[in-house]
Image: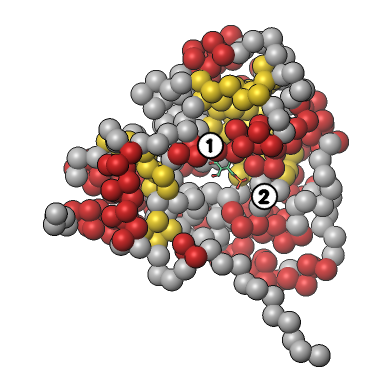
Amino acid sequence: MEEVKAPLYKNLAYEGDVIRLAQNENPYGASPRVMDAIIKNIHSVSLYPDVVLTTLKEKLAKMNQVSPAEINISAGSVSLIDQLISRMVKADENIVIPQVTFVAYKLCADIHFKECRIALMDHYHIDLDAILKLCDAKTKLIFLSNPNNPTGTILSHQQIIDFLAKVPRETYVILDEAYTEYVERADFPDYKQILKQYANVIILRSFSKVFGLAGLRIGYAIAQQAVIQDLETNRIPFTITTLSNFAALEAVDDQEHVAFSVKNNAIGREILLTGLRKLGYNVLPSESNFVFIYFETTQERDALHDRLFANKIIVRKMEAFGDARSLRISVGKVEENAKIIECLSVPQSN
Ligand SMILES: Cc1ncc(COP(=O)(O)O)c(C=O)c1O
């Protein structure tokens, strides 16, 4: 019989020698130890995955200094966002989010026909008072990406504590910390202290960023036991694949790769921030693995996007994230960031 070849997944925008800086991935990839673990365990793809994920939960609990009963593992944090919205928000209840933030909150709210209220920003910073003003007795979830994707700014521990004191206990505050490893500021919220005090807080974490496992879809939530128990009881079985489990187990153990990625991100972020500012661009401070540039007009934004695109550098316009006059550039390898500054430093002929 003639062999049938499966079509390869193709993303045309990313073919060839392009520099892809549009999705906040780890430019150095997963750790070599993770690759070895995947290859070593490749035979396991014919077996159903472990449903309870005890070992990974124990490792994550240890890494985060909480108990395994306070951890719920999911097929990427987006699937947790989806589960939280579909499971917790009733038909007549609502969700509140900041205007310029991670696209999945509104997307999942729309998928589940849940009302999503949008709070205006304060000069591209999350405005917690504006969020509170939109809340009412029917507000079930508030999503705060911290650092915020795409602006890269953070809300401090004190800001979160003051905010939580004003939020009713029936409203859950989701602190999405997908980029937590990249944060340098010492006043970043202390999730352990917050979780001890607040049963209505859920922390989200991801293996897609610093661990470099975006393609394997794995993330987790940390919260008080009762919240985790509900998530555990109501999750779809087998969504975390066997290879994702092996990869995550090894990734947690390879903290050297995490440190290497964080260190190079800090160097690259500085190259971008300093270089872009010198060239006259408005760039927000960043505590993450991307930088955010804002413009007076959409046309100016498009001009920068197209100039980078012409140099095979792919960055992201922010319409889907709530703003038509900004651009997000993921921090690449050190030399890729230097290339951006280099190519923008060349005078343009009109
Ligand atoms: C704030 C935030 N949360 C979650 C995610 C998605 O994480 P995952 O790949 O674990 O679904 C992203 C991805 O860009 C993100 O920016």
Residue located 62% across and 25% down the image: 116
Q: Quadrant of the N terminus?
A: bottom right
Query: Badge 1 is on which residue?
Result: 102
Residue located 67% across and 49% down the image: 218
Tally of numbered discs: 2
Q: Element at badge 1?
A: loop
- Given residues 38 and 102, the one toward you in this image is 102
Spot occupied by residue 289 in the image (x, y as percentages of width and height): 43, 45
* Any part of residue 53 in sight: yes
Location of residue 57 by image quarter: top right
In this rendering, the answer to whether 60 lies above or below 5 is: above
* Any part of residue 184 in sight: no
- Given residues 140 and 5, the one toward you in this image is 5
Q: Is residue 209 left or right of residue 334?
A: right
Identity, as a three-letter code, of the amino acid under mark 1: Phe
Identity, as a three-letter code, of the amino acid under mark 2: Ile
- Mark nearest the camera among 2 and 1 is 1
Residue located 49% across and 14% down the image: 130
Location of residue 243 by image quarter: bottom right
Q: Is residue 36 left or right of residue 153?
A: right
Is label 1's Cβ within 8 Å of ligand 1?
yes
Q: Is residue 28 left or right of residue 42?
A: left
Q: Which of the marked residues, 2 or 1, is nearer the chain's N terminus?
A: 1
Query: Badge 2 is on which residue?
Result: 218
Spot occupied by residue 177 in the image (x, y as percentages of width and height): 56, 36
Whether tag 2 and tag 1 are in contact, CB under 8 A, the answer is no
